[in-house]
Amino acid sequence: MKTRDKILNFALPLFTVAVIIGLWATTAKAVDSEYILPNIGETLSALKKLFKSAEFYRAFFGTLLRSVIAFAISYLLAFCTALLSYKSEKARRALKPVIVIVRALPTIAVVLLLVVWTNSRIAPVIVTFLVVFPTLYNNLYAALSGIDKKLDEMCTVFGVNNKKRLKKVVFPQIAPEFITSAGAGLTLNLKLMVAAEVLSQTARSMGYLLNTSKVYFEISTMLALVLITVVAGLIIEWAFGFWTKRTVKK
């Protein structure tokens, strides 16, 4: 990659962030009301206050744990069903209506029903799974379908054992897509989990803190919580993106 391209890859995202911050500062100044749009200083002050609160850490890690659990269930089931669909056309056809129905479920209605049927801690996990699972299934199935069948057939002809075939042929082809899907899925899990917690009013969660801030009209705290969720999602995406690049290089 040329030096100019490297500079642009670094500078353009920073420029975009600067524009967003500039628009925020300008709009907050024009509105001139912390109850509508707090300025950057007020939001940073709320952020600092959150980082000093033990309640925030309980809420954040509670939400993160539920997100990881929902993601693990979604990814495992998506992988198993995608592999089954890849191996069997009949299985793929049988699963297709299920995937379509699950994808079409209205999220808000499902959350409200699940709160009645389960409780406010389990409901967000289930609804997050229901939203993320179809996307993961499609991504993983596409990755498996992209395996070069000629290379696989060549391994059969030359008697390459399954272990070596997986390591040298199959894994290098599917690993980047599998890791990228994992990063995107976990990030989506986190965002959906917070939204589901808001609707479910889950105790000790980011959603609960957002609800509380809304009740007391602490808009700067709400913005701070949103920023934390966004940054956490960006870190997850970056970590999995870095992992994908390392895998491709190998």
Image: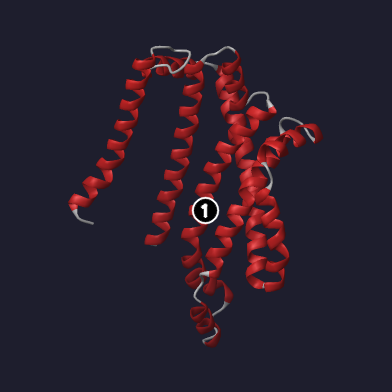
Residue nearer the viewer, 93 or 41: 93
Give the left or right position of residue 211, taking residue 181 as reference.
right
Query: In the current view of this chain or complex, which residue is farthest to the bottom?
Result: 157
Query: In the current view of this chain or complex, which residue is farthest to the right?
Result: 117
Which residue is painted at 60% across and 25% down in the image? 59
Q: Quadrant of the C terminus?
A: bottom left
Label 1 environment density (alpha carbons within 10 Å; few <14, some 14–19, many ≥20): many
Give the left or right position of residue 223, taking residue 130 as reference.
left
Which residue is painted at 55% across and 44% down in the image? 186
Residue nearer the viewer, 122 or 215: 215
Which residue is painted at 33% across and 34% down in the image? 17
Occupied quadrant, residue 217: top right
Task: Check disc 1 and give the amino acid type.
Answer: Ser
Residue nearer the viewer, 163 or 72: 72
Residue nearer the viewer, 168 or 15: 15
Q: Position of residue 101 (x, y in %)?
A: 70, 53
Q: Residue beneath label 1, please?
A: 181
Q: Position of residue 204 (x, y in %)?
A: 64, 24
Q: Is residue 210 above or below residue 189?
A: above
Q: Quadrant of the N terminus?
A: bottom left
Give the left or right position of residue 152, taking residue 125 as reference.
left
Occupied quadrant, residue 161: bottom right
Q: Is residue 50 above or below residue 93?
A: above
Query: In the current view of this chain or complex, which residue is farthest to the front?
Result: 30
